Image: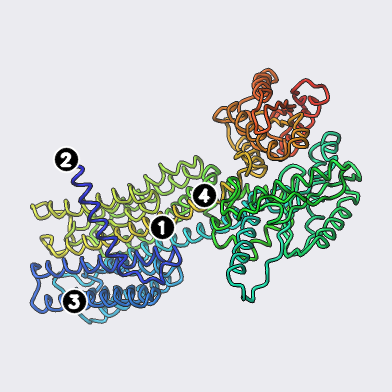
């Protein structure tokens, strides 16, 4: 029963803390996710500071201090507590996040400076390294710009303290030593603050770059989710969403006009849907190949886009089928004008690599709500009209004249359509719509997709020299590896400075030898880790070794510097925890933070028990207030890192969930659920890149499948039945694949497959027979049992071709060879 009780108690505490944090969040701060998360962090920190200050206030009464020192510490504690409370109240009432964040940073920085001033100055104050806390807060709440400014200010304050001490100005101190203010103490405090500041800068700067990079890719993915990769027109999913939105808006206006008989709102114009199917396009594909067919489709798409008005929407429905949504159409005259203009534009010769080609088109029109009161009914009516035009000889147009039932429009959206409301607001801006309805090419779309799915663009510089190619395959790993490399390079600079300080400092010979040995050992380890990361890309090993190296180095540094009583680098035990949070996330960072706290407590216990470390000070025991300050510094800095990493991870997860939804729409065929043309081309490019980049190379076979006998099904039974056939074929193709294989729909009745680890014609035959058998099985549809066959063309990589375009051309040639010979499948001969 104990674990459930503990879990329930933890859940209750978590809810109470979350409720307390939410109590101080102003409603205006909930509009933007990033601001809301940072506000919650600020509130949690202010509440935590108040709790810590209350504990410090209680322990202050037990510390070995004079009455004056007790009074000063108590006044300082109460002042900071009051300031935090006022900021919380202002945040709840006004929602002034920028003001409260900056004020909290300045308040903590001022309290830290006063604490140093009343604790012996930089030379003796155990709180000197706590000045890193406001620096961390400045980076987290204000970004790199304000963090850099506060870091410079803290550096100037530390230098001013040291200058005043050397000018003879003494600060009150409870630590009495016989030595003058050591320069080592100042260097350690100075380096410690700037090391923490630099780590925060690297993390904030890199995470900001990652966020911008992901947001940029997200915007591209939103456009790709609504765009046909080949033609650049609106795709089927997005077109259905626009049509459904127009239907709902039309119905709302019509309903309001019917209720408010005296309303000044004019009756809504008719919604006209045009279904366009190219005549004799299959012949072009069969005679000249899919590459030439793609050129024809791209030219038709450009002509359609030029023929319509700016408010109309043109989409590609699939294969050689297009749809046009006409806006503000008031009668048959508008329909006739648009149809004649479109037919005239399409009939013009199209220049392709195979020469000038000519196609015709059959257009079917349906008017809402006369011909259909729902999205599906309207599309069906336009489909019927189009086939009526095709039966009359093609190259003309018809309007569906069979009025359907007058039932009110259903708010339901087609199962394969994408409601525009499900996309982020950024997807619905004028720029986004313009990007969707504009013209693009398959090559540009594939480049965008590869950039989004494979890796962000490389950044030149010294960091990239140590970045192994394997680290570029995942954006998160690449981002964390860059933090690791920059941290190691920073450590090299700090270690070099430490060597100079140790050599020039007034220390006994034994102390110099010990410190130099630790410094040189850390230097050698850093160089080794950089080289290993550059050669092998073993991020996990190098990041773990870096954290252990810093933890061990700090531990021995404390042991050879007098222990907890006098070691100026005790608070630097927080740096390994900071790095663990940044390199490995919340879980490992928390482990290292708890280990650092336990180590400091253990060292204090050993000192209190009589164990003496090598000590250059005249302090013979570890004062309790020294331990409290060190523990508070560790806890605050580790807590800051924990909260920031936890919050950043939550933000990333929320963004990634949204990005995943958009990416799924961008790379999925709306009808079949398979990978679309864009995704398949990206996967093919990625496999070729991996083959060229790795030693253990894996060949594969590319298969192009074209259904035989599918066009008559579409022409006789309509596109709804044809869609059922395509969906069943897609399910069967998925059943033929292994885990490492891949399948996608190219468009119309064409599919492409990748069969992994296939390098010979004998291996190809096994898969060809399996796919052919599955396709030939009867397909049960709403119009009865149907049957289709398939022609399969295979190309072997790298034997048939070594790049994606050449490989697809080879598979295309093999498919048409199989179609001509009626053999079912064929393999392109080797180069």
Residue at screen point 62% across, 55% down: 244
- Secondary structure beneath dot 1 equals helix
Mark 3–mark 1 Cα distance, whole angstroms, equals 32 Å
CA gap, disc 1 and disc 4: 15 Å
Q: Position of residue 750 (x, y in %)?
A: 72, 35
Horizontal arrangement in the rendering, residue 271 relative to residue 645 (left or right):
right
- How crowded is the residue under tag 2: few (<14 C-alpha within 10 Å), some, or many (20+)? few
Disc 2 or disc 4, which is closer to the eye? 2
The Cα atoms of the two marked residues, 2 and 4, are separated by 43 Å
The residue drawn where x is 49% and y is 42% is 537
Q: CA distance from mark 2 to mark 3?
A: 42 Å
First in sequence: mark 3 vs mark 1: 3
Mark 3 or mark 4, which is nearer the start of the sequence? Answer: 3
Q: State the residue position of label 2.
A: 1
Mark 2 or 3, closer to the camera: 2
In the rendered view, how is the structure colored?
rainbow
Q: Is residue 785 visible?
A: yes
Q: Which mark is residue 648?
A: 1
Residue hosting label 3: 78
Q: Disc number at residue 475?
A: 4
């Amino acid at each position: 029963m104990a674990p459930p009780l503990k879990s329930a108690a933890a859940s209750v505490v978590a809810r109470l803390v979350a409720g307390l944090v939410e109590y101080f969040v102003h409603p205006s701060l909930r509009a933007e996710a990033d601001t809301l998360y940072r506000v919650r962090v600020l509130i949690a920190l202010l509440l935590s500071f108040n709790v810590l200050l209350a504990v410090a206030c209680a322990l202050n009464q037990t510390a070995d201090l004079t009455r004056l020192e007790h009074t000063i510490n108590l006044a300082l504690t109460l002042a900071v507590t009051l300031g935090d409370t006022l900021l919380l109240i202002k945040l709840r009432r006004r929602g002034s996040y920028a003001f409260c964040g900056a004020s909290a940073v300045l308040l903590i920085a001022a309290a830290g400076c006063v604490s140093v001033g009343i604790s012996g100055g930089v030379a003796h104050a155990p709180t000197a390294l706590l000045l890193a806390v406001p620096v961390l807060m400045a980076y987290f709440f204000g970004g790199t710009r304000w963090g850099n400014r506060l870091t410079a200010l803290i550096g100037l304050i530390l230098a001013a303290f040291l200058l005043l001490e050397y000018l003879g100005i003494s600060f009150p101190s409870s630590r009495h030593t016989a030595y003058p203010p050591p320069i080592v103490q100042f260097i350690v405090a100075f380096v410690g603050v700037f090391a923490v500041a630099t780590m925060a800068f690297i993390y904030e700067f890199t995470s900001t770059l990652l966020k911008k990079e992901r947001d940029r890719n997200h915007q591209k993915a939103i456009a790709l989710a609504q765009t046909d990769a080949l033609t650049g027109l609106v795709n089927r999913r997005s077109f259905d969403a626009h049509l459904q939105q127009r239907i709902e808006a039309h119905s709302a206006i019509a309903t309001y006009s019917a209720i408010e008989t005296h309303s000044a709102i004019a009756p809504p114009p008719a919604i006209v849907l045009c279904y366009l199917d190219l005549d004799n396009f299959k012949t072009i594909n069969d005679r000249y190949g899919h590459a030439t067919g793609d050129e024809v489709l791209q030219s038709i798409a450009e002509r359609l886009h030029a023929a319509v008005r700016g408010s109309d929407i043109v989409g590609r429905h699939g294969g050689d089928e297009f749809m046009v949504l006409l806006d503000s159409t008031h009668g048959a005259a508008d329909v006739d004008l648009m149809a004649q203009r479109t037919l005239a534009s399409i009939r013009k010769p199209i220049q392709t690599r195979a020469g000038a080609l000519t196609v015709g088109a059959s257009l079917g029109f349906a008017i809402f709500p006369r011909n259909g009161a729902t999205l599906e009914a309207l599309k069906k009516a336009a489909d019927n009209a189009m086939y009526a035009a095709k039966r009359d000889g093609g190259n003309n147009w018809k309007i569906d004249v069979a009025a359907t039932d007058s039932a009110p429009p259903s708010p339901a959206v087609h199962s394969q359509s994408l409601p525009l409301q499900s996309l982020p607001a950024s997807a619905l801006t004028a720029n986004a719509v313009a990007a969707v309805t504009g013209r693009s090419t398959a090559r540009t779309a594939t480049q965008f997709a590869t950039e989004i799915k494979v890796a962000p663009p490389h950044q030149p510089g010294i960091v990239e020299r140590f970045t192994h190619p394997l680290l570029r395959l995942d954006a998160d790993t690449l981002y964390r590896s860059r933090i690791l490399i920059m941290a190691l390079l920073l450590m090299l600079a700090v270690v070099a400075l430490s060597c100079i300080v140790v050599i020039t400092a007034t220390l006994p010979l034994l102390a110099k030898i010990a410190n130099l040995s630790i410094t040189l050992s850390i230097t050698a380890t850093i160089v080794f880790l950089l080289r290993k990361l550059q050669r092998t890309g073993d991020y996990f090993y190098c990041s773990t070794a870096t954290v252990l190296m810093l933890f061990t180095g700090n531990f021995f540094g404390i042991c050879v510097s007098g222990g907890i009583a006098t070691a100026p680098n005790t608070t630097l035990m927080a740096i390994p925890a900071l790095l663990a949070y940044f390199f490995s996330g919340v879980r490992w960072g928390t482990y290292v933070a708890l280990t650092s706290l336990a180590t400091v407590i253990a060292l204090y216990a050993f000192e209190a028990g009589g164990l003496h470390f090598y000590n250059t000070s005249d302090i013979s025991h570890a004062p309790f207030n020294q331990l409290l300050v060190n523990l508070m510094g560790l806890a605050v800095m580790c807590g800051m890192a924990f909260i920031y990493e936890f919050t950043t991870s939550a933000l990333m997860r929320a963004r990634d969930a949204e990005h995943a939804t958009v990416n799924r729409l961008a790379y999925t065929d709306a009808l079949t659920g398979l990978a679309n043309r864009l995704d398949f081309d990206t996967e093919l490019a990625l496999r070729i890149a991996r083959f060229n980049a790795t030693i253990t190379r894996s060949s594969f076979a590319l298969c192009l499948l074209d259904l035989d006998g599918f066009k008559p099904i579409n022409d006789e039974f309509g596109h709804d039945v044809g869609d059922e056939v395509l969906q069943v074929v897609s399910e069967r193709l998925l059943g033929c694949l292994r885990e490492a294989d891949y399948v996608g729909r190219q468009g119309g009745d064409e599919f492409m497959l990748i069969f992994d680890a296939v390098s010979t014609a004998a291996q190809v035959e096994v898969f060809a027979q399996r796919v052919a058998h599955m396709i030939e099985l009867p397909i049960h549809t709403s119009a009865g049992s149907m049957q289709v066959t398939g022609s399969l063309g295979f190309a072997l990589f790298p034997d048939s071709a070594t790049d994606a375009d050449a490989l697809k051309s080879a598979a295309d040639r093999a498919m048409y060879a199989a179609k001509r010979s009626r053999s079912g499948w064929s393999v392109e001969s080797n180069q």
